Image: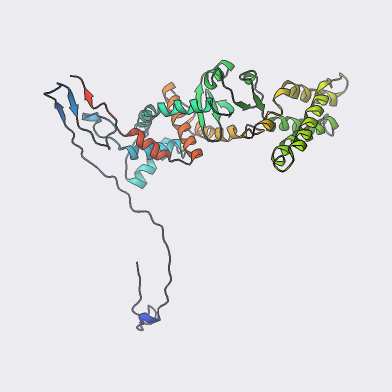
Amino acid sequence: MEVRLAVCPDCGHELEESQGRVIEQTILELPVVVPRVIRLKTYRYECPGCEHTVSSHHPLQVSTATGAAGTQLGPRALAIATALNKDFKLPLRKSCQVLERCFGLPLSPGGLSQAMERVAKRLEGQYAQSLVELRQSEVVYSDETGWYTLWVFTNQETTYYRIVNQRTRETARSIIGENFAGVLVSDCLSIYDDLNPIQQKCYAHHLKALSVALKTLEGKGSAYLLELRALLHSAQLLKPMGQDLAPQQVEQWRQFLEKRVDELLAQPRGQPDNLQRQQEEKIRQRLAKQRDHLFTFLDYEVVEATNNRAERQLRPAVISRKISCGNKTEQGANTWAILASLAATAAQKGDSFIDQVAQAMVLKPDPVSTR
């Protein structure tokens, strides 16, 4: 687009085109969006050859419903509406406001809720597949919070949410599977104990416990606690530094860490008349219980020392819980878990959740139905 001046806007003097100096800009603008309202006619036939009832179909169809249910949102409209609520975490009412004010698409919160239940049903297979991928992966990070109980299992590429009634070891095992062979990274909640053979306990939780103990009047300045903290920090530093060290040096440092931690955790610290020793004993018991899970992350390149990855995936879920006050029905909880899981996974993989939903909602009916 070119915008020229024929005369000076100040004095009215004629301006020569050859004297003009070009100033270029690039402007990104959004067009005014209005819904496309499409009247679709399909046909149903009674085949005289095979005596089957057959129908024509169009890619915009998401359902074969007719009558009062014959007015429907198309696949992409459904996908954007779902993404506003489950990917961008807008409340139902605000999602509907965006749809109407930005796209001219009127929709009630109740209508959007029911639509997302239908979307979740279409995506159940992909949700189940994400759990299969986690069960076969090298590492899974886990955390949980109240909802009833919202559990998250995640790694670098996949996130899986599940809302359950009980926070028990049996429930966790039913999700992660009986034979999970990877590394499970979690906090020190007892339900994770013996859930699978190879585990890493979160350093962030250990270090927080040490920090709290060192800030107490009894634990302040404890050489024992300070050395334990230094050893955990040293283990965290060893992993990235190991890339620049000779394998022999890495092994020497590893042997030192293992030996020194064993020495520090071997003997009880508690004494009835020594409050500092009592603080030290609490930390000793904590780390001694998880001794086998202190340095697992050093043995696996893809394993991190903390379960921060799971906690980061819980934060948007906690925001959703705060906004919605949770779910009133099991179906609503299941819908949230499916859609939130796939939205988070799409973001991790750099895929489009909107495209994923739109493709899933295209009707793929059986072309033949028996009379």
As drawn, the residue found furthest toward the left would be: 48
Q: Position of residue 317 (x, y in %)?
A: 52, 32
Out of 29 and 274, give the one closest to the viewer: 29
Which quadrant does the C terminus fall into?
top left
Q: Residue at x 23, y 30 (%)?
A: 68
Out of 255 and 309, give the one closest to the viewer: 255
Determine which quarter of the picture holds residue 245.
Answer: top right
In the image, taking residue 45 as reference, residue 94 lies left or right, namely right
In the image, taking residue 361 as reference, residue 344 lies left or right, namely right
In the image, taking residue 364 as reference, residue 51 lies left or right, namely left
Q: How many marks?
A: 0
Q: Is residue 349 above or below residue 151?
A: below
Which quadrant does the N terminus fall into?
bottom left
Determine which quarter of the picture holds residue 16.
Answer: bottom left
Q: Residue at x 48, y 41 (%)?
A: 350
Query: Is any part of residue 271 visible from this angle?
Result: yes
As drawn, the residue found furthest toward the top would be: 170
Query: Is any part of residue 166 visible from this angle?
Result: no
Determine which quarter of the picture holds residue 18.
Answer: bottom left
Q: Residue at x 35, y 28 (%)?
A: 118
As drawn, the residue found furthest toward the bottom would be: 13
Q: Position of residue 252 (x, y in %)?
A: 79, 34
Q: Position of residue 131 (x, y in %)?
A: 49, 26
Coloration mode: rainbow
In the image, taking residue 190 as reference, residue 260 lies left or right, namely right
Q: Position of residue 55 (x, y in %)?
A: 19, 29
